[in-house]
Amino acid sequence: MPDESSTPSATSIGILGGTGKLGAGLALRWAAAGLPVTIGSRDPERAAKAASDLRAALPPGSASLEGAGNAVASGHPVVVAAIPTDGAADLVAGLADQLAGTVLVSALSPLAFDGRGPRPATVDGAASAAELLATTAPGAKVVAGFHTVSAVTLRRADEPLDEDVLLCGDDEAAVAVVTALVDDHLEGARAVHCGPLRLAATLESLTAVLISVNKRHRSHAGLRVTRL
């Protein structure tokens, strides 16, 4: 059993790649819900500008939302990797010391595109992007999740999400931290613990499915697991 006392609570959140669509949407939702957020970027000035734009959309009484370099963003008890898959391992490797002991949420979805649309892909020969990050930052407690949540829906912060967020991870206490982030701080969303981190490839592949669904139906659909 994991030592729950050694797993941090989500008192604040750092988002690597927080200037991207998914990271920015999560930052907006969590800051509006009262959790301090730092969005990171390789370019701190770009992160500061993105944070300023997001703050303008926050309601009164929201928590702080700041922008900084990825090294600063990684200094939180919970860190979300919402970065492009290409180069993710190198970025996380460079932050491995700062990430030791943190809950590292991998929202990466390796995809390949051709004329027929997206399909799941592999990254650096690993079984999944989440497992690659777990190897790259062995001191972090990696949880895979948020692969089926639409960035467009996240930015509509005044509307409930009305969907499930599928999670998997080997550290039960870390999964519980991310579950609370979803259940308590993302209105209308429900976290569903799907099992160990070895299932991450399956969750990551669902991104391609949802992109195809949303393109075909011109929607921003999410997923619900029924009869739980």
Image: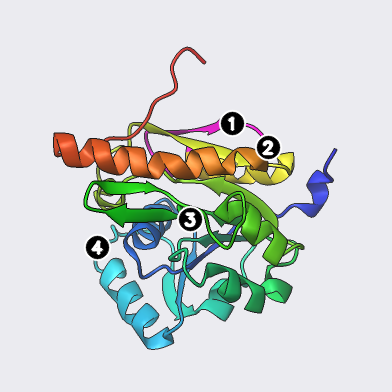
Above or below: residue 160 compared with residue 150 = above
Of labels 1 and 3, earlier in sequence is 3
Q: Which mark is residue 222?
A: none
Is residue 35 something that shows in the picture?
yes
| Residue 151 vs residue 90, the one in the foreground | 90
- The residue lying furthest to the top in this view is 227
Q: What segment is highlighted magenta in the picture?
A: 183-196
- For disc 4, the marked residue is 57
- For disc 2, the marked residue is 196
Q: Is residue 27 magenta?
A: no
- Residue 191 in percent (x, y) is at 51, 34
- Residue 28 in percent (x, y) is at 35, 58
| Disc 3 element | loop
Label 2: how many Cα within 10 Å (few below 14, some 14–19, many 20+)? some
- For disc 3, the marked residue is 108
For the residues labelled 3 and 2, the Cα–Cα distance comes to 17 Å
Say whether residue 56 is left or right of residue 124: left
Tags 1 and 3 touching, CB below 8 Å: no
Label 4: how many Cα within 10 Å (few below 14, some 14–19, many 20+)? few
For the residues labelled 4 and 1, the Cα–Cα distance comes to 33 Å
